[in-house]
Amino acid sequence: MSQDPVIEARSLNLTFATNDGPVHALSDVNLTINKGDFVSFIGPSGCGKTTFLRALAALEEPTSGTILVNGQTPDQARQKRSYGYVFQHAGLYPWRTIAGNIKLPLEIMGYSKSEQLRRTDEVLRLVELEDFSKKFPWQLSGGMQQRASIARALAFDAELLLMDEPFGALDEIVRDHLNEQLLELWKRTNKTICFVTHSIPEAVFLSTKIVVMSPRPGRITDVIESSLSVDRPLEIRDSTEFIEIAQRVREGLRAGHGSE
Amino acid sequence: MRRSFLPIIVVIAGLLAIWYAAVVPMNIKMALTAAERSGIAVTPVGAKERRDRSAMLLVVQNTFAIKDTFALERPRLPAPHQVATELWNSTVNKKITSKRSLVFHGWITLSSTLLGFAIGTGLGILLAIGIVYNRAMDMSVMPWAIASQTIPILAIAPMIIVVFNSVGLQGIFPKAIISAYLSFFPVVVGMVKGLRSPDQMHLDLLKTYNASSTEGFWKLRLPSSMPFFFASLKIGIAASLVGAIVGELPTGAVRGLGARLLSGSYYGQTIQIWSALLAAALLAAALVALIGLVQRLTLNRMGMS
């Protein structure tokens, strides 16, 4: 894995003005993410993990500090279509079939008809939904819808996959299965993934780098480089190495709470 | 459909029963006057005597006249079968080119209804797009649209007719403008709501694709507004029909359902008035049902029903 930084955040601050006064969503965040990293952001609600992801995708404007994505501002990167964003809810268009939904970004980005078809088929196969291309979203289960939305984010060549609690609304069995599939995808495509989650096992299982955050003000309290190998069967979650990393994440989260 | 058949029949039968029951006291005085004139003994004697009597009491005292109340030529309230007969005679039994054919008059009203509906819907959509995409229009247009609907249409209709007449526009067009005046409003309200219905996540998603706002309109806002659009159309088409009929009233028009209503009231032809009213109601129901059908087909195709 190369060590080229894809994302560099330097003394990033982001404050929301609300009716109850300013909310300090991100406070002095410094972070470097390298190409091919799988980075999880973990922390309690209000710790700014989603805000960081949104700032990365130019959906929020930082109050001060800088973010560089491949040496460019997030907005420039957005205009170059560098982001594949996956939201907590699949957010498929109900009036488009699964294939139609995956074509949406391709249509907007001006791919030719034949290229649209080729890519749609390819990503549908990648998420094992090739038999459902003509179905409407409501005809699919929640887990399948989420897989379709991941396929949609993969269909164009986004360098960065930004995933905001994509499996948060799913049950644990489906979630385990999707985690395995996501790891497979990541290894095959070698994309850089930023993944927001509430779940410690999920973060440890998936990541090469775990960013522990804490709220009020939202800040990074620990960055853990995972020592787990890239090949991870589900059983790895019972290994001592896995449990030790999970322990460190848990302590980081607790320390963040203790400082209040 | 089959399951709702029985309840519908029961409700219609109930309404008809109430209607028939109301016909007797409403028409009893006229029936008694006619009976007295043809030499039948009536209690009490003399129309003057009966004028201040309660209708119910007269019915009880003169039960023989009950059947007459259903068969008067110009009843105060015509019986359902009289209206039905008139409706049948003036549609099926008349050539549609005849001035007495309700199909002829219905078509006149329908054509200006449809033209006005098309103008109103187009205008409504354009205004809604303006309101959603332009902040100045958002702040300024809606209050005027609401104010426009607080003016009684009966008050403004004659002026619209007169103004258009003075610039040489007559016939279908001024009436269509009145229809448009009534039908643009539900379309504006529904489409503004519909075009704003996509949630933030969908809008954010398009932003991450760097989509233009034109693409946002065609690929997201317009399709998500469809259920709202059809709901508005159903209100709009009924309002259009009302507008067209109202547009025919103040001008002394000789053609159209409104003209039928007007001439019926000039000559005390209550049966004619009621049958024109019923024809208008059936026309409105058919138009709304037609839009309902288009809605079902469209949303089905979109996988949204």
Image (spheres, coloured by chain):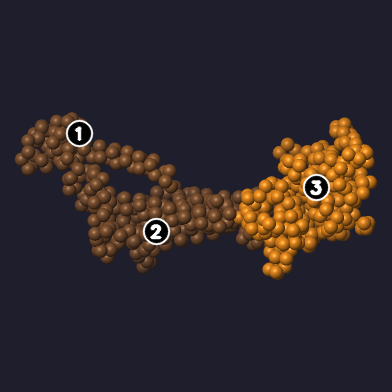
Q: Which residue is mark 2?
A: B113
Q: Which residue is mark 1?
A: B55
Amino acid under label 3?
A: Asn
User: Separation of disc 1 and disc 2 at Cα?
Assistant: 41 Å
**Label 1 packing within 10 angstroms: few (<14), some (14-19), many (20+):** some
Q: Residue furthest left?
A: B39
x then y, percent, for residue B296: 50, 54
| Dot in front, 1 or 3 | 3
Q: Which residue appears at 93% of the width and 39% of the height?
A: A240
Amino acid under label 1?
A: Ala
Q: Quadrant of residue A15?
A: top right
Report whether residue A147 is seen: yes
Q: Which residue appears at 63% of the width and 49% of the height?
A: A138
Number of dots carrying numbers? 3
Is B269 on the left-hand or right-hand side of A190?
A: left
Amino acid under label 2?
A: Thr
Report whether residue B141 is seen: no
**Label 2 packing within 10 angstroms: few (<14), some (14-19), many (20+):** many
